[in-house]
Amino acid sequence: MLCVACYMLHFFVLYLFLMDKNKDFTLTPEVKVEDAELVSGSPAGMNIVELTALINRYESDMKKMKDNLKIQSGMLRDAVEGDAAYHEIDIQSKDIQKKKAEIKQKVSKTAAMEAVLAKVEEYKSEIKDAKDMLSGYLEEYQRVAGTNIIEGENGEIKEIIPQYRLVKRNNG
C-alpha cells in the first residue's frame, strides 16, 4: 500500500498527466504513472464534460485516500495506545494538561486578561476581514492588470495565486 506522500506525489503527477481515454482510470495503488499519457496542452483544452468528469473522479479518489488515511492512522493510534509504557505516560500527561488548563483558566479570569482576550479576538476578526478584502482586491488587480505578478512596497515580486476548492452547496 502506498504511503500518503506517495499518494500526493501520484496525485500531482496525474494532474500533469491525464489518462488515456481508452482506459478506465482511477487513482489506486495499483495504477502506475506509466499508465498515464500526456495530453496536448493543459486542462484548459478540455471541454466542460471532460473537466467535470475529471474533477468528480479526483474528488472521489481524494475521498478514498482520506478514508484509507483514516484507517491507517487508526491502526497506528491503536498500536501506540496499546503499549503499556505509552498508556502510563499518557495518563500522567492528561493529569498535567488538566492542571495546566485549570491554571490557564484561573489566570484568564482576571479582569486584565479578559480585556487581553477580547483584544485578541478582535485582532483575529480584523485580520480575517482584511484577508477577505485583500483577496477581492487581488482578484480585481489580476483582472485589470492582466497579470498575476505584483511588486510589493519593498520591491519584492509576489505572485497572486487563486485558491479553488469544492464545498457542499446548500439547496435549501
Image (cartoon, grey):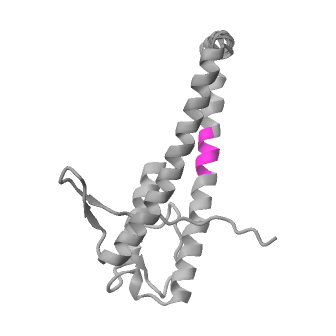
The quarter of the displayed image where residue 144 is located:
bottom left
Q: Position of residue 162 (x, y in %)?
A: 42, 65
Q: Nearer the viewer, residue 162 or 48?
A: 162
Residue drawn at the location 46% of the way across and 56% of the way down: 7
Q: Is residue 2 among the parts visible in the rendering? A: no
Please state the total of marks drawn on the protein image: 0
Q: Where is residue 67 drawn, in percent x and y? A: 64, 53
Determine the residue positioned at 42% across, 53% down: 6
Q: Which residue: 43% across, 83% down?
A: 20
Q: Looking at the image, is 74 positioned above or below residue 116?
A: below
Q: Quadrant of residue 148?
A: bottom left
Q: Is residue 22 visible?
A: yes
Comparing 131 with 31, the one in front is 131
User: Given the current orientation, which residue lies at the most extreme right position?
Assistant: 172
Task: Judge by depth and name the residue closer to the eye, 171 or 137.
Answer: 137
Q: Is residue 81 magenta?
A: no
Residue closer to the observer: 167 or 142: 142
Q: Position of residue 159 (x, y in %)?
A: 29, 61
The magenta segment: 68-73
Q: Quadrant of the C terminus?
A: bottom right
* Residue farthest along the left direction in this orientation: 155
Magenta stretch: dominant secondary structure: helix
Taking the spot 44% from the left edge, 56% from the top edge, the residue there is 8
The x and y percentages for residue 145 are 30, 75
